[in-house]
Image (cartoon, helix red, strand yellow):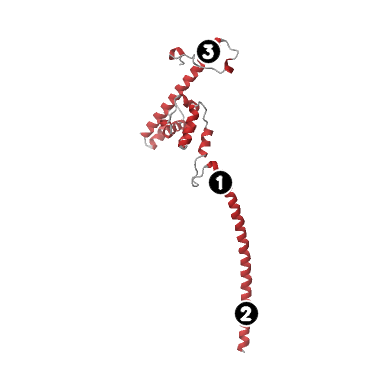
Amino acid sequence: MTLSTQELGISSDNIILPSSAIEGLKPFQVSMMKDCVYQVRNNAKIAGELLRSTAASLYELKQNLVNKEWMAFLKSGALPIPEKQARDLCAAWEGWLKDADVTDGDLVFIGTRAMAKMKQLEPEDKKKVVKKLKAGEKVTEKYVDTLKEKTYTLLNGVDKDNWESVTKDLGGVNKELIASNSGFRSENKSLLEKISTLTKENEELKKKIAELEKMVAV
């Protein structure tokens, strides 16, 4: 059921509409538009409140079930939402939402999948997302994925912002190593040929020594 602004006890008179939206409209149309904007904003806050409450309830239940029981519950069809969405909400609450400084209205700017993925972000990146939400900016799953890619790698804490330059440098080093290795192989081949030649010369010398020894013996 949709409540009127009078029933909610709050006036929509404080709603400020963009000039581009009200250009050429009559006063009653502007008034209706303000009421509509107010209603949508209010419903968004209610939706955010329900989202937060649902996430908290799911997390609380999970804490009181072993994993096997939790999985059985999710797959039982007892919830009116998909299993994946329930998982995402639970992960979001555990990973950041329970301690986040966001209002119920802020939560309408982010989907449950993006909310869940925020769990894997570094604290500073979580703050970036929260800042966008509080500014009324939409946060997409793709944006969160981009932040995830910027987390530190296992390569001695190298930031992925510098990953391109690092790999470029490594690529140059690799080329030098390949060139050096090629040179070593060439030198090694040359040495092997010399060793082979010396071995043959040594065999010839042994034969000559043996012949000389026979001549001396006679």
Of label 2 and label 3, which has the lower sequence position? 3
- Mark 3 touches mark 1? (CB < 8 Å): no
- Mark 2 touches mark 1? (CB < 8 Å): no
- Mark 2 touches mark 3? (CB < 8 Å): no
Question: Mark 2: few, some, or many residues within 10 Å (few <14, many ≥20)?
Answer: few
Query: Residue sitting at 49 percent across and 17 percent down?
Result: 38
Front-most of residues 25 and 56: 25
Question: Mark 1: few, some, or many residues within 10 Å (few <14, many ≥20)?
Answer: some
Of label 3 and label 1, which has the lower sequence position? 3
Q: Horizontal and vertical percent for residue 53?
A: 41, 26
Picture layout, residue 160 above or below residue 186? above
Which amino acid does the dot numbered 2 rest on?
Lys
Q: How far apart are the two marked residues, 2 and 3, measured between alpha carbons?
A: 115 Å
Q: Could you say whether the residue bearing mark 2 is in a helix, strand or loop?
A: helix
Nearest to viewer (mark 3 / mark 1):
1
Visible in this render: residue 211? Answer: yes
Q: Which mark is residue 207?
A: 2
Which amino acid does the dot numbered 1 rest on?
Val
Which amino acid does the dot numbered 3 rest on?
Met
Task: Identify the residue under disc 1.
Answer: 166
Task: Identify the residue under disc 3.
Answer: 32
Q: Horizontal and vertical percent for residue 89?
A: 44, 31
Front-most of residues 61 and 50: 50
- Quarter of the image where the C terminus is located: bottom right
